[in-house]
Amino acid sequence: MLGMNSIWHWIILLVVVVLLFGGRGKISSIAGDLGKGINAFKKNLKTGQEEEKSEEARRALDANPIAGERVKKDEAAKG
């Protein structure tokens, strides 16, 4: 009978458990690496959006410099 009583079943199960939980907490280090990757992705995504906005503003100023001067004067008046 090859089921729960098989020696190979227990050996394979033991190997899997040691790989997952053995050593320095491999699951927590994998989760930490995943979290760092997600944070880096979000940071780069945000930076890319900010660069897009500044590029759009530059193009708008290039297309209509008079409007750009008005915006600068309005910002100076506010600040």
Image: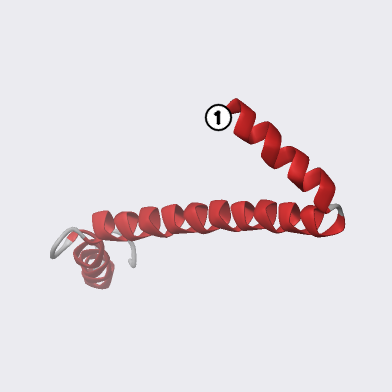
Q: Residue furthest top?
A: 78
Residue 43, percent across and down? Answer: 48, 54
* Front residue (pair 39, 10): 39
* Front residue (pair 74, 15): 74
Q: Residue furthest right?
A: 63
Point 44% across, 58% down: residue: 40
Establish if 14 lies above or below 78. below
* Front residue (pair 22, 36): 36
Point 66% across, 54% down: residue: 54
Q: Residues within 10 Å of mark 1 (few under 14, many from 20)?
A: few
Local secondary structure at mark 1: loop
Q: Quadrant of residue 74?
A: top right
Location of mark 1 (residue)? 79
Q: How many marks?
A: 1
Instruction: Work out which quarter of the rendered image holds the N terminus and state it.
Output: bottom left
Residue 62, percent across and down? Answer: 80, 59
Establish if 40 lies above or below 9. above
Residue 34, percent across and down? Answer: 39, 58
Instruction: Work out which quarter of the rendered image holds the C terminus and state it.
Output: top right
Query: Does residue 47 appear to the left or right of 35 in the view shown?
Result: right
Point 62% across, 58% down: residue: 51
Query: Does residue 63 appear to the left or right of 28 in the view shown?
Result: right
Query: What's the amino acid at mark 1?
Result: Gly
Q: Quadrant of residue 71?
A: top right
Name the colouring of the figure.
secondary structure
Point 64% across, 34% down: residue: 75
